[in-house]
Amino acid sequence: MKARIYRTCGANQEKLADLGEFLLEKEPYSEDTAVMRKIDVVHKMINIHPEVAFSAFDGFGGAVTEATAVNYMAMPEEMKEEVLRSYFSQEEGIGYTLARVSVGSSDFGIDSYSYVTEGDETLESFDFSREDRAVVPMLREAKKWAEDLKVLGSAWSPPRYMKDNNSYQGGHLLPRYYGLWAAYLRKFVDAMQERGIDIWALTPQNETRHQQLWESCCYSAQQEMELVKKLGPALEGTDVKLYLYDHNKERLFERAQAYFSDPEVAKFVEGVACHWYSRDHFGQIQLCKHVFPDKKVMMSEGCIYHDEKGFGNDPWGLALRYVHDIIGNMNAGISTIFDWNMILDEENGPFHWRQGRRFCDSAIFYDKKNNRLFYHPYYYFVGQFSKFIRPGAVRVGHSSYSPLLETTAFRNPDGTIAVVVFNNSDGCLPYVLRMQGKLLNRIAEPYGVETILLTQEG
């Protein structure tokens, strides 16, 4: 058995560094118990059990917000190609296979908009030209690098006239417009398809529980369920998957309980979606997978943010949150992971209605003033997973001797085993990777992440 190892570590300034190939040694064994006591490997182990399989993983991706697409369209042609290659090529980049787009405007757009004129109860004014400016062209180009690109659509707000407060910000969808809003979402799906972009999945509302400063709309579980009873039939004839909730993890399970207790709703819904802004709560994902094993859990958004405009004072330190969250989510049974904006400018935008809020980061920044790209360290940390854990990979059993060595492991469709080890401490930590009677001795660098790609010889 051989291993190829890749590492990202701020202390060493390593960014997806290829450390080379290593051979695993046969584990020593003796029938003589006295000898066995001397040669047996007991301490500092990370065990991998590929014979124990859990749920499959569907892939990694990021959000093509209007901000992302506008920044992309402003780039020189060679820079555009570099960005798409960096994100969507497995060989030369980090191998994204997913993209998230907003249905209408989000806070990371130039301004607020919908696809219809105010008060249109026929949807005859539906006009998709806003997305034709930047979002659609970027998605089309991305598909050249990721042919099987899966696109998730998420709504931030219905048009104002459909809401009880006549505003994009907060409020509720009026019950009499549930059917019209469902038809609107179907028109979005059809418009994308007409442009060669298949919508793989929909979340009918981003952040269902909060009235934000920007585009938002609040739904109780029951209100969202009533919408689904209109939306499910409206999507008939498509392959679009529905995911509900699309908000922070701490209440994920109780929402799932409500949705999936109603057979009429459950038949239309593939799973639930969550964000990371209330911190870990990995147990919420585990509960959903345990009680509803046939339903999926998606992480539809995560983003680091800070008070300083620009890239932050400690980008390497900020980036480590991605590693911890990805490992926790994957071990809990998550099926997909989306980052937020794929490209922001040097002022962390463009955006609107975010005055007084913190500045968000992206994995790649387009510094327009200096016409350069800045790769945030978390681009490389995410790549330690997305480049090597491929769509269709199945999580396998593992154990670690220390909680400081956060670990996950997956068997890829090609038979390779990808093991990711994160040393969440400020000191070097030794470990022995052990699988099927073979051993590999390693030293985990402080706050470093390494991916061990295991293959059978011959």
Image (spheres, helix red, strand yellow):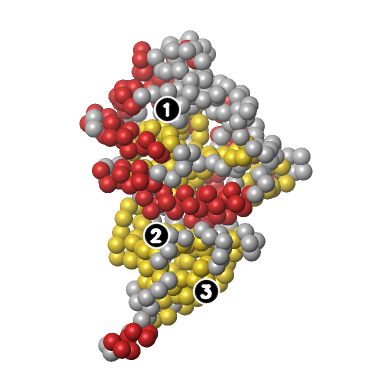
Mark 3 lies on a secondary structure that is strand
Which label sits on residue 209? 1
Are the residues at dot 2 and dot 3 in contact (C-beta closer than 8 Å)?
no
Closer to the camera in the image, 233 or 317? 317
Disc on the earlier residue, 1 or 3: 3
Q: Residue at x 54, y 47 (%)?
A: 144
Estimate the spatial distance between the alpha carbons at disc 1 and disc 3, rounded to whole Å. Answer: 49 Å
Q: Identify the residue position indicated by label 3 in the image.
A: 21
Query: Where does the image place residue 299, in percent across and percent down from the top left?
Result: 43, 42
Which label sits on residue 264? none
On-image quarter of the N terminus: bottom left
Estimate the spatial distance between the alpha carbons at disc 2 and disc 1, rounded to whole Å. Answer: 34 Å
Q: Residues within 10 Å of mark 3 (few under 14, many from 20)?
A: some
Query: Where does the image place residue 214, in percent across and percent down from the top left?
Result: 55, 24
Disc on the earlier residue, 2 or 1: 1
Q: Is residue 366 above or below residue 235?
A: below
Mark 1: which amino acid?
Arg
Estimate the spatial distance between the alpha carbons at disc 2 and disc 3, rounded to whole Å. Answer: 19 Å
Q: Identify the residue position indicated by label 2 in the image.
A: 410
Mark 2 lies on a secondary structure that is strand
Q: Is residue 175 above or below residue 386?
A: above
Q: Residues within 10 Å of mark 1 (few under 14, many from 20)?
A: some
Q: Is residue 431 above or below residue 152?
A: below
Query: Where does the image place residue 383, in percent across and percent down from the top left?
Result: 54, 55
Residue 186 sits in which quadrant?
Answer: top left
